[in-house]
Amino acid sequence: MELQKPIYFKDKELQGQITSDSKRISDYDISIATGKIVPDIQCIQKDRDLWRVYVKSTEGRSKLLREGFDIRNRHISVYDTNPYSAGLDSPNERVLKITVKGIPLSVDDGEIVKMLEQFDLNFTSELKYEHIRHPESKKMTGILNGNRFIYVSPLPDGKFLPRSCKCAGLHCLIYHYGQPSNKRTLKCTNCWEVNHSRNNCPNQSRCKVCKKEGHNPGDEACDEYSEPIPNVVPFAGASDVLSNFYPCELKAFGVTHRSSEHAFQYVKAVRSGDIPRANAIQSAPTALDAKRIGKTISASKSFEDSKLELMTEIIQAKFDQIPKFRESLSKAKKSGSVFVEATYDDYWASGLDKSGTIHTRPSSWPGQNKLGEILATVADSRPSSKQHHRSNSVPRPSKDASQLSISSMLKELQTPRKRDCSGSRKPSPKSQFDKNG
């Protein structure tokens, strides 16, 4: 059964001075009174001194919340939030719910309160625990999901809490209503305009590169079409050793991973304080599965600020540990060679498939190709034959991965350290081709 969030009122405010059981207002009386305001009451439920009224429609709930109802010549105002959870004395009071995510349940509540106190908040409730809800009925279970929340007085206009913060030495995420969103601008993958999706696009399909109708990237009709350039080295997919999806046993950050994609999504989860998903990523059978889990993680600022360095360290470890990768990278490295991940990712890759990538001028690739740049940097800075040296990513023999606790991994990953990454960054492929014409 699908339910709207209920509205609330206190039984003592409803009954007033009534003491006789025979004269007390019943759920039937309330159904008649509220039914005069909205016709779609779904459930009226009493829990000790608290009444919950469920309305079928969002519009009906809003109307009842706005107008209240009259019963026995008295007007009853209702609450938008459980008044006992939020610490409210009057329906006219307003509160703000602050939710903290990413902190292990073992961390004491006092540490979270201490973190929140630095923002000069006026707490109206104690810190509370969030429960897992059924995905369809939204019915609350008895199992906690690890999130904690607290109610506070509304923040002044223009003030909001940071999304990413640090608590007890760990990174966490803070959410509340009105907080600026860090979500990317919605872009349609059919016409490439913003603020709508492919599903409701009113336009004809357009080329992602030249934005004209009637063809796809890489077609000869595209204004940016090019014959394949010999020194462009595209890679993609689990069968390509240059790709992060290539299955291999890779040691990085004190743990053995099934691919470099596993390693990257794992460090994303740990840096963001999401240990359950970190464990799930380690167990993911394929790199694609690991990436899908990684997409569900709310990345921390710490991770976003250092993801290029982290990816570089992973690729360096792969170069040192995987002979086939080292040989392929060294063999492909030629003067002026441009490595490019030929996938639709607009940050790590060209933003196009393989055909579109090799038949489009590199200066017109819609993606930034950050992974390709990292491969070029590693190819230039590492020796072509493996030396007897150890990457910073590889654990010492005396410290087996199974012996590393979650807390020690968190400490290692959250503490900035010098990366094994020498040399300046290689100019981007776009700038090279722009310069050379």
Image (tube, helix red, strand yellow):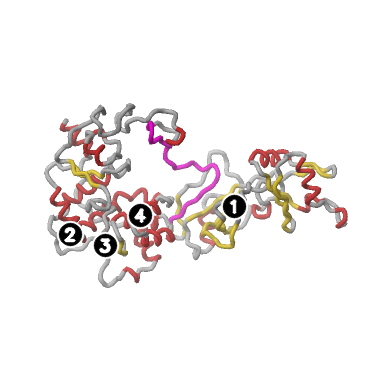
Residues drawn in magenta = 171-192
Side (left or right) of 207 relative to 30: left
Which residue is pictured at 26% across the width and 52% down the height? 312
* Whole-percent x, y for residue 420 in the image: 23, 56
Q: Which amino acid is tagged 1?
A: Ser
Q: Earlier in the sequence, mark 2 or mark 1?
A: 1
Numbered badge on residue 137: 1
Looking at the rendered image, the disc whose residue lies closer to the viewer, 3 or 4, is 3
Which residue is nearer to you in this view: 419 or 29?
29
Side (left or right) of 100 relative to 203: right
* Whole-percent x, y for residue 419 in the image: 26, 55
Q: Which amino acid is tagged 2?
A: Pro
Residue denoted by label 2: 323
Side (left or right) of 197 relative to 433: right
Which residue is pictured at 47% across the width and 56% down the height? 102
Total marks shown come to: 4
Residue denoted by label 4: 265
- Kindly report the distance in space between the C-alpha atoms of the residues bearing marks 4 and 1: 31 Å
Residue denoted by label 3: 249
Q: Secondary structure at mark 4?
A: helix
Which quarter of the figure has residue 36? top right
